[in-house]
């Protein structure tokens, strides 16, 4: 792992852990069983464009951040960041554009988050419609934010 990759990975992991804590009051949406903290996927999405290892580490950081603040159900949903981040990072390594990576990871992300709530006793409607569709919308919003930040970092020759 290169120094630059380690630094970006550490910063993104710190953000992934901080966002659930700092943004719960004013950037959070609650429609049980769905919750969304705007910006929460951005560190995982940016990590995909650095390396698969970075994506996995940031996903773990996101899982821990949500576990500390919102408990096991939301932490389980956040653990899907590890999987969709690894998937997206591998697509990026194969030459997919950032936009295509984020589009390809959207259904994987939404499906995983929908499936992960079923063992917690939620109905298929709650899992599929409330969590699945909610996650797809949340993923889309955070993807726009991540692409904007990635563009700014690229223009500043930081990425």
Image (cartoon, helix red, strand yellow):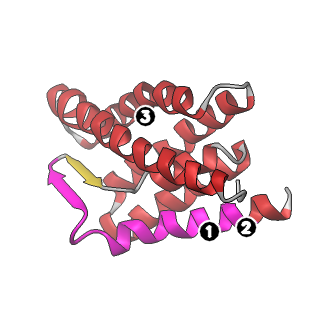
Secondary element at image label 1: helix
| Residue carrying label 2 | 7
Label 2 and label 1: CA atoms lie apart by 6 Å
Label 3, label 2: how far apart the Cα atoms are: 26 Å
Residue under label 1, please give it.
Answer: 11
101 and 130: which is toward the camera: 101
- Give the residue furthest to the bottom: 22
Query: Foreground mark, 1 or 3?
Result: 1
Which residue bears the numbered disc 3? 109
The span from disc 1 to disc 3 (Cα, nearest Å) is 23 Å
Q: Residue furthest front?
A: 155
Q: Which secondary structure is most common in the magenta stretch? A: helix
Q: Are marks 3 and 2 in contact (CB under 8 Å)?
A: no
Q: Is residue 61 magenta?
A: no
Labels 2 & 1 near each other (Cβ < 8 A): yes
Query: Could you tell which of marks 3 and 2 lies nearer the N-terminus?
Result: 2
Estimate the x, y position of residue 98 in percent, counting from the top left. 58, 34
Residue at position x 76%, y 58% in the image? 5
Contact between labelled residues 3 and 1, with CB atoms less than 8 Å apart: no
Region of the chain picked out in magenta, as a range? 7-32
Residue located at (70% from left, 42% from top): 52
- Which quadrant of the rendered structure holds the N terminus? bottom right
Q: Say which residue appears at 21% left-offset and 72% top-offset.
A: 25
């Amino acid at each position: 792992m290169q120094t630059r990759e380690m630094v970006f990975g550490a910063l993104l992991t710190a953000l992934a852990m901080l966002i659930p804590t700092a943004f719960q009051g004013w950037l959070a949406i609650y429609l049980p069983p769905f919750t969304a903290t705007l910006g929460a996927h951005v560190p995982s999405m940016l990590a995909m464009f650095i390396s698969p290892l970075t994506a996995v580490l940031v996903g773990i950081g996101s899982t821990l951040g949500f576990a500390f603040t919102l408990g096991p159900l939301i932490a389980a949903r956040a653990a899907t960041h590890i999987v969709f981040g690894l998937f997206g990072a591998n697509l990026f390594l194969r030459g997919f554009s950032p936009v295509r990576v984020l589009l390809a990871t959207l259904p994987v992300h939404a499906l995983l988050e929908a499936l992960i709530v079923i063992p917690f006793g939620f109905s298929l409607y709650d899992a599929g419609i409330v969590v699945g569709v909610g996650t797809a919308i949340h993923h889309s919003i955070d993807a726009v934010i991540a692409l904007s930040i990635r563009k700014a970092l690229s223009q500043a020759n930081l990425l």
